[in-house]
Amino acid sequence: MSEATAASGPDAGTPDRGAGPAGGTGRAPDIAGKPGAGDSLPTVLEVLRSLDSGPRGLTEAEAEERLARWGENTLPERRAPSWPRLLVRSLRDPFTAVLVCLGLVSAAVFAWGTATVILLLVVVSCVLRASGEHRADRSTAALRELVATTAGVLRRADADASPTAREVPVDELVPGDVVRLGPGDLVPADVRLLRSSGLTVHQSALTGESAPVPKRAGDDRAPGADGFEQPQSCYQGSSIASGSATAVVTATGARTLLAAGHARGADRHRDSAFDRSVHGVSWILIRFMLLTPPLVLMSNAALRGRGLETLPFAVAVAVGLTPETLPVLVTTCLSRGAALLARAHGVIVKRLPALHDIGAVDVLCVDKTGTLTQDRPLVAGALGPDGRDDPDVLHWAAVNAWWTLQLAELPEPDALDEALLDAADEDALTAYDGTAVVPFDPVRRLATAVIRTPGRLGSHTLVVKGDVEAVLERCRLDGDERAAGRERERLRRLAAEAAADGLRVLAVATAERPARAREYTPADERGLSFRGLVTLRDALAPTAADALAVLAGQGVTVRILTGDHPGTAARACRDLGLPVGEDGLLTADRIDGASDTELSELVGRTTVFARCTPEHKARITEALRGAGHTVGFLGDGVNDLPAVRAADVGIAPRGAADVTREAADVVLAEKDLTAVAHAIAAGRHAGGNIATYLRITLSSNLGNVIAMLSAGLLLPYLPMLPSQVLIQNLCFDAAQLAYVHDRPHPSVLVRPTVLRPRELLRFICGFGLLNAVADLATFGVLALALHGPGTGDDEAIFHSGWFTENLITQALVMMLLREGRLWAHGRKPGSVVWAAAALAAVGLLLPPSPLGPPLGLTTLSPAYYLLLAAVLALYAAAVLAARARYERRRGESGTAT
């Protein structure tokens, strides 16, 4: 018996309105039985004729011929890109393209060392990224599951033979096959029902909704029904909850509705948050690099009369502005975070940039069922006819559930009966003797158990449970006809109030009958005494409340997009402490009537979107993105596919519909918000380190470029040799790789981390100017305290002094511009501190070492170091003051670079 659709309430007897995927069915032209919107429903006879089949099934020869013509009943395989193709695709990254251009330009001016280093870094970055994504593809390929393995089918040896039932592999089913379905069976293809008995079907793999949907054989089309809502058809990917049926296969393989969704999921959605950020930052670098070489050449030609001999220096300046190790660091940060996430929490990041995107998420859209609530109800209460609590009502409802299960020989109780049995005293249920049962069916919307109470000979008790209206119609109420009508209306209002509060409602009634041996039928369900109402609510997911609190602490707003009744969704939110408010709930009809501009305003203050179709979910996601949010969407049904693809980050659990899981960017071990919170934390960890690297590297590089241009105009020689620029950049970039292993301060995790090009540009300009001022002050120190003009050591001393100051200032900013607190009390120095110390040591020790003279460096006097210490102290104080002002302004605006 299944009564999930018999309960009155928000979702009573109403399939999910969001139950079909957008678009067509992908059917072959001559296969009928699954009408689209506006089409007339073909009769069963017309379907059989179009398939050239009949109730006796196909012959073996016909099945073989059709298998050869239509192919196997399998979903089209999505071939994962090969490793070489992933490697080539990684070259399209804008950062990588910038570096390739610089490497080629360096080679063109015969700066072979610079060109070799840059191109080597490009190769390393591409190999790391391609390898990480290839591993993710292999992991998700292992998650592909067969929809079913075998199916019961009627086949005949020849045209005159009688049909025999046998099991055949699902991939050998063909259109026209007649299959038999029973409780627990997976529907192996799209089918049209020929006969059915008490059939209800779980379509959660297709629609994401947990309540079984009633199905029936017939030729009448349900008003307004389309797609998965059609009661005469069942679809591949669904399963039988209760009852039995015989059906004819109408579509297999690539022609099923499930495969149609699979095909629509083949195209990737448009650029994500990471893609947009990368393009923005890349264009900042490109503008600076295109401007720098001509400026260097023209200024040196105009003021110093130098010609093309300064071209290698100009290229070195452009290279100095570029964070050469950026692709390597970004790829390493993301791949390391993805690997840790997979090992610790079973979360697979299929596309490495998606880890950054999920860290940038500030709005997470989820369905209710399976995310906030479990796929089972719980008893909320039992009300007598007067509206007061009455435990006897629950007792009688559980008696009905117990003996219906026992006598109807069902494999297991349905969800509502299981909830009733869990809430009742089992010993009290077995005190009766069950004698007969009239099972539930979707037409009557009732189930009746006939019991005998020990000690009461000659009497049977009918216990009836089901839909409120169906039960009330069969009850005898006190008083005349008018009084009985008023009482019936009062009871309806009592049930409606409970339903409006988001509860499912079952009515319970009993009747005493003389004992008899004759079989009981639905005609005996009359003259009942109304006992009361049992209310049920959705069981909350055990981790949902804690996960919502964690997400709120991370600055993520949760939006509920569901096909359920608004009352059901709102109640689940209230039970979990998720505020909805008076204006926080929107239904499908309101969404349909809103323009795109109006919807963009509504989504900002709406928490629950109810009665959503796939198109509604995708449109809401688009509106949120259009309002400037970075949106993640967690879905598991085929109906979630358009929204999964429309979001910045599509998220699906491992048990999701195959097409939805393959379209997702992130795959969870389970449909659990806690795993999403872990993924967001990992994304912010990686994104925070990448943003810190960009801020520090670009601001330091910009300061150096400004200082180089100034010095080039003031000095009769190049301020730094190209080889020295290259060594300095390599040392700094190598030290910056320590950010891959850095642990950002917890404050980084409480807000989305997005690379905002405009804010990044303001940061690097401000702190770059500070760095340039420190360099110019060092020039003054070199002019005052060191050898004056006319000595042979001027050039080497200038190069050495600036080389040392550059590396020490870069070591300082590595520590002073990290996210969060500067120093972590009680913690040992991390990788960044050790890398900064090593960088400063190179700056101090390389000039006087034996390697110094070959590089054009020399030993410096002690006086220089004393004056340099004063300059660095002032520089550190200025950086700290600027940082405090920057963080204060960022806190007021609530943004994160």
Image (tube, helix red, strand yellow):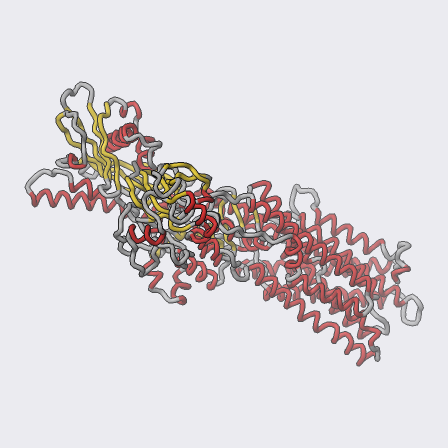
Q: Position of residue 32 (x, y in %)?
A: 35, 54
Residue 475 is left or right of residue 631, and the answer is left
Q: Quadrant of the N terminus?
A: top left
Q: Nearer the viewer, residue 832 or 381?
A: 381
Q: Position of residue 602 (x, y in %)?
A: 39, 61
Q: Quadrant of the C terminus?
A: bottom right
Q: Position of residue 273 (x, y in %)?
A: 55, 59
Extreme-top residue of the structure = 455
Q: Nearer the viewer, residue 102 or 708?
A: 102
Residue at left offset 55%, top offset 45%:
347
Extreme-left residue of the structure = 480
Residue at left offset 37%, top offset 67%:
595
Residue 853 is left or right of residue 477, and the answer is right
Residue at left offset 8%, top offset 43%:
483
Q: Is residue 649 visible?
A: yes
Residue 462 is left or right of residue 741, and the answer is left
Q: Position of residue 462 (x, y in %)?
A: 18, 30
Q: Is residue 776 visible?
A: no
